Image (spheres, rainbow, N blue to C red):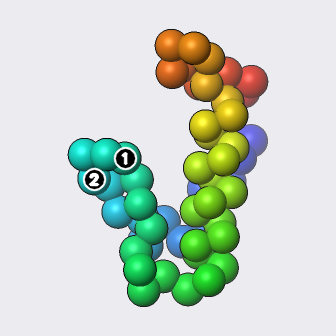
Amino acid sequence: MLDGPKGLIYWIDTEEGSKISKDAPEWAKKEFEEYQEYFNKSKDKNGNLIDF
């Protein structure tokens, strides 16, 4: 199971989706990008999460 992100406090939810705070440390920005890539790859054509 995937652990929750340690830098979640730096995530910002917007109408366009999640973003990372500009003042987030580099490790949190890297973690955010890794999570975004992982979940974007794990969706089917309807946007449902798969491979879990």
What kind of element bears circle 2? strand
Give the residue furthest to the top: 46
- Tell me residue 3's x, y (percent): 68, 54
Residue drawn where x is 59% and y is 75% of the image: 28
**Horizontal arrangement in the rendering, residue 33 relative to residue 17 (left or right):** right
Which quadrant of the rendered structure holds the C terminus? top right
Asked if 49 appears above or below 12 in the picture, the reply is above
Asked if 38 appears above or below 41 in the picture, the reply is below
Image-quadrant location for residue 4: bottom right
Q: How many marks?
A: 2
Give the residue furthest to the left: 15
**Horizontal arrangement in the rendering, residue 10 relative to residue 43 (left or right):** left
What kind of element bears circle 1? strand
Residue drawn where x is 65% and y is 66% of the image: 31
Image-quadrant location for residue 44: top right
Residue designated by label 2: 14
Mark 2 is surrounded, within 10 Å at the Cα level, by few (under 14), some (14 to 19) or many (20 or more) other residues, namely few
Q: Amino acid at mark 1?
A: Gly
Residue drawn where x is 41% and y is 60% of the image: 19
Residue drawn where x is 67% and y is 21% of the image: 50
Spatial separation of the CA atoms under disc 1 and disc 2:
5 Å
Mark 1 is surrounded, within 10 Å at the Cα level, by few (under 14), some (14 to 19) or many (20 or more) other residues, namely few
Which quadrant of the rendered structure holds the N terminus? top right
Residue designated by label 1: 17
Q: Which mark is residue 31?
A: none
Whether the residues at callouts 1 and 2 have beta carbons within 8 Å, the answer is: yes
- Tell me residue 7's x, y (percent): 54, 71
Q: Amino acid at mark 2?
A: Thr
